[in-house]
Amino acid sequence: MSMPDLRLAVFTALTILASSVTLYSVIHNTYLDTSNPLLTHLSHPLSKTHYFASKANFINVYFIKKAWAWTTATFFISWITSPPSIRTRERLLKWVAHTTMWLIFTGWFFGPAIFERLIVASGGECVLALPSGDPITVPVELCFTKSHLSPSSHPELFVTSSSSFTPPVDWHAAPRLRRGHDVSGHIFLLTMAILFLTDQLRYSLRLIERGALHTVAVAANVMMILTWFFATYTTCLYFHTPLEKITGFILGASCFAITLLPEVEAAEKRRKAGNVKQLKET
């Protein structure tokens, strides 16, 4: 079973946007390699002239960093205001499936999240950026536990550091996984969120009549999708290497496709039942 027209149209538009902007970022060298420990703590070179190249832009701070919370709120507003005919358990289960995959890839998977495990497996290291800008490598477990490190809490790390600068005793910071393949978590989540909200929008667009509250919810859904499209544009233009964005996009689309499997199975059963009925009639 192929994706219905709305989902296919949005998926096609998203693919064109992500691929064309990523290509532009390579040709014009606008992207920042966020896995490079010598660069990741620095401001984007274009941040002074391009507002959305700064991680402090309002889309990143207030929307992208809370992307699944916004997506969840948009979904439940739409679901709660829907008439009983489309306020189904199937839709709730889709949200549960997407949320579970988001947590597995970015939050926890019997310990470190899958993305964290992938960085380490591809040669990544746990790196602490000192105030001087010098990076020091620390045990990877400290990244998995998201520990804050300081000269007072972990003096042995700073004594063995090759850096000539020792930070103040009261200074502390959290190390980050760097150097490995850092799948773009933003592109992964934005791709999944756009396709999920588009899928949910189909139920509302099939209604002949919609109440005032649900009409507002539909408008909010559309605005959220457009916001995530713009966030995808800025992320593809300014952050992550092309391969990291490609893998983020593929994984996000794949997770969405997994949630369609019950529909595919149900459609196949209906097709077989229809064939059996035709054979009996003949």
Image: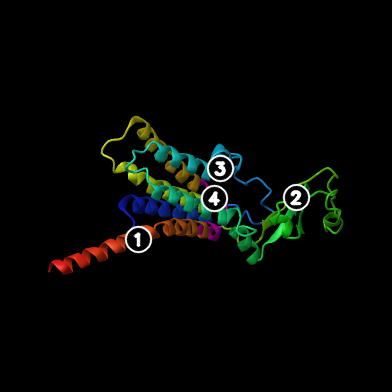
**Image point (22%, 63%), residue name:** 274
- The residue pinned by badge 3 equals 66
Region rendered in magenta: 234-246
Q: Position of residue 3 (x, y in %)?
A: 34, 56
Residue 72 in view in this figure: yes
- Amino acid type at circle 1 is Val
The residue singled out by tag 2 in the image is: 133
Q: Residues within 10 Å of mark 3 (few under 14, many from 20)?
A: few
Camera-near label (4 vs 1) is: 1
Number of the label disc, if any, that sits on residue 264? 1
Q: Residue at x 72, y 52 (%)?
A: 175
Is mark 2 in CB contact (under 8 Å) with mark 4? no
User: Whole-Å distance between the Cαs marked 3 and 4?
Assistant: 10 Å
Label 4, label 1: how many angstroms apart (C-alpha)? 28 Å
Is any part of residue 37 visible from this angle? no
Per the picture, the main secondary structure of the magenta-coloured stretch is: helix
Q: Based on the displayed image, in which of its 4 quarters is residue 205 positioned? A: top left
Q: Helix or strand or loop: what does disc 1 sit on?
A: helix
Farthest front residue?
280
**Secondary structure of the residue carrying numbered label 3:** helix
Q: Type of residue at label 4?
A: His
Sequence-wise, the earlier of marks 2 and 1 is 2
User: For the residue labelled by badge 4, is the local secondary structure a helix, a strand or a loop?
Assistant: helix
Q: Please tell me which residue lies in front, 211 or 215.
A: 211
| Amino acid at the residue labelled 2 | Gly
Measure the alpha-carbon separation of dots 1 and 3: 31 Å
Label 3 vs label 4, nearer the camera: 3
